[in-house]
Image (cartoon, helix red, strand yellow):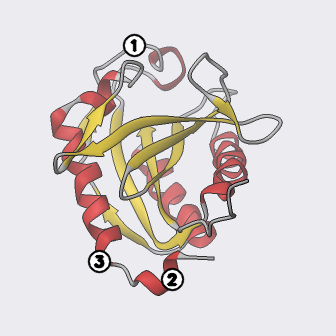
Amino acid sequence: MGEYQKQKKVKLFCAILYSDKEIYENCLKILEKDFSKIDYISNEIPFSYTSYYQPEMGEEIYRLYISFSDLIYPYKLAEIKKRTNDIENYFKVEGKRKINIDPGYISLSNLVLATTKNYSHRIAISPEIYAEVTLIYEKNSYKPLEWTYPDYKDPQNIIHFNNIRNILAKQPKEKSEL
């Protein structure tokens, strides 16, 4: 039998898609109130990887990545995903989302995303929420896997994940264990 190991805390981040700047700015205030001070915000990136979100959000959609100063335990990801879904619903206009918030965490070895959709490479982390390892860290950078979404594979976006990882690496170690 293996011995129990203490979980290390990880860095919470959110990938945000939005089409309404005012909703985005109000959403950031709620996210900071709920999860802690934002310590990283990427540049605004026009989202052109898929047209999947256009029927709900319109033609002009932007992506950015944020991270939070307080570290979390990995097992908290399911409840965080439920909360971000509630925030998305709060900002719906005529039943359509104007913001999409995909939470995940960054550790020194990988990037994990939460999702409501099951698939062969995802594992259940609560009755309604699944998680997947989306990127792994090797040879000084995050690397995509077979199922990694196109925007997470983009080298310009991987720079942001590496930047967030660098912030994590500098955070006090005593705060990172149970």
Q: Residues within 10 Å of mark 3 (few under 14, many from 20)?
A: few
Disc 2 marks a residue whose amino acid type is: Lys
Closest to the observer: 113 or 176?
Answer: 176
Q: Position of residue 36 (x, y in %)?
A: 53, 73
Report if the CB atoms under discs 3 and 2 are less than 8 Å apart: no
Query: As displayed, is residue 78 above or below residue 32?
Result: above
Marks 1 and 2 sit apart, C-alpha to C-alpha, by 41 Å
Q: Residue at x 65, y 46 (%)?
A: 81
Marks 3 and 2 sit apart, C-alpha to C-alpha, by 11 Å
Disc on the earlier residue, 1 or 3: 1
Q: Which mark is residue 175?
A: 2
Q: Which mark is residue 170?
A: 3
The local secondary structure at tag 3 comes to helix
Q: Position of residue 177 (x, y in %)?
A: 56, 76
Camera-nearest label, 1 or 3: 3
Camera-nearest label, 1 or 2: 2
The local secondary structure at tag 2 comes to helix
Disc on the earlier residue, 3 or 2: 3
Q: Which mark is residue 51?
A: 1
Q: Residue at x 67, y 42 (%)?
A: 85
Marks 1 and 3 sit apart, C-alpha to C-alpha, by 37 Å
Q: Position of residue 31 (x, y in %)?
A: 55, 62
Q: Residue at x 44, y 57 (%)?
A: 25
